[in-house]
Amino acid sequence: MDVSEEPINIEFIREASEILKNGGLVAFPTETVYGLGGDATDKEASRKIYQAKGRPSDNPLIVHIAKFEQLEQITTDLPETAKKLADAFWPGPLTMVCNKNEVIPYETTGGLDTVAVRMPNNPVALALIEESGCMIAAPSANTSGRPSPTKASHVYEDLSGKIEAILDGGPVDIGLESTIVDLTEDIVTILRPGYINMDMLKEVVGEVRMDPGIVYNDKGTTSGAKPKAPGMRYKHYAPKGDLTIVSGEENKVVSTINKLTADKRAEGKKVGIIATSATAGRYEQGEVLIIGDREDEQSIAHNLYDILRQFDELDVDIIYSESFATPKIGQAIMNRLLKAAGQKTIEV
């Protein structure tokens, strides 16, 4: 159902709302990625989401709301920081983890006593929440482990025949999942990096820390600590081709990727390369796709998942990517890229 044009086709929103109210599933756009939605208070709807995605049942679903009061309705011991963060970043790409009450079932929270909640900054998503009267549980609308969907066509590719409807709102804005912060401890803790970065959070609430289990060093490995967010323990975003990230000084990175590509092609492998607009012309062989411009880091985030899916369509065996440690959202970009690569990196 095409809802990409203004004003939004309210009949399509009503049709999708009826599906949700009757326990069905609807994929819909947000500003981050497309979500696969069901009524967050309905145990069976949540079970259907896990089944459609092939998602591990201990990986919680994020509850999408349209009013701050809804957060108060489903939580207990809500800290003052929640209101501060909501005032600063909602609607927007920030998910808060809070202690839950009995309104949201354990089937939605992956068996946890906490609930992850956000208010999406997308008119289609907000209209769907309002019209349906449902708080909507929604992970990304893709097969579990695949690159997240940033277009309705990505959702159709993965979930056609498994869900009742797809609301096509056109390409998403940001292209990376929301920042997740844990508000159940004394210090706000980032459980998943995203567009809202640590500096932005500190301006609102003061001290903020990063979950040690998601902090990567220059070699693309972590401290070895277990990530607190269950979703961060699973392989995600992976293309079908074997992805490796090559990091270091630009000339050395280009030279190394050119040599690796030549070697793999000599073995009969089809090679893909993720490059920027500045470096794409320097690669001599292989399927070269431009992810964006380093001076416009949001372009890199916006195009990442689409690029990975394009390489699937090109049926490449091997993918080499430059590293993208950009200033504002570089940590979020590299978090997703490293997980897609299974932490495979080459430092040059």
Image (cartoon, rainbow, N blue to C red):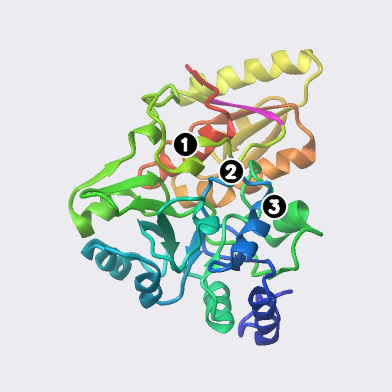
Estimate the spatial distance between the alpha carbons at disc 3 and disc 1, rounded to whole Å. 34 Å
In the image, 244 versus 191, the foreground residue is: 191
In the image, 104 versus 334, the foreground residue is: 104
- The picture quadrant where one finds residue 48 is bottom right
* Secondary structure state at the residue bearing disc 3: helix
Mark closest to the chain's N terminus, 3 or 1: 3
In the image, 143 versus 174, the foreground residue is: 143
Report the amino acid beneath label 2: Ile
Residue corresponding to mark 2: 291
Residue corresponding to mark 3: 51
Residue corresponding to mark 1: 324
Report the amino acid beneath label 1: Phe
Give the magenta part as a residue range.
Answer: 241-245
Estimate the spatial distance between the alpha carbons at disc 2 and disc 1, rounded to whole Å. 10 Å
Report the amino acid beneath label 3: Gln
Q: Residue at x 64, y 63 (%)?
A: 44
Q: Residue at x 41, y 52 (%)?
A: 179
Look at discs 3 and 2 and give the one toward the viewer.
3
* Secondary structure state at the residue bearing disc 1: loop
Mark closest to the chain's N terminus, 2 or 1: 2
Q: Residues within 10 Å of mark 2 (few under 14, many from 20)?
A: many
- The picture quadrant where one finds residue 340 is top right
Q: Main secondary structure of the magenta part?
A: strand
In the image, 75 versus 18, the foreground residue is: 75
Query: Is 246 left, or right, of 314 in this rendering?
Result: left
**Residue 243 within the segment the image draws in magenta:** yes
Mark closest to the chain's N terminus, 3 or 2: 3
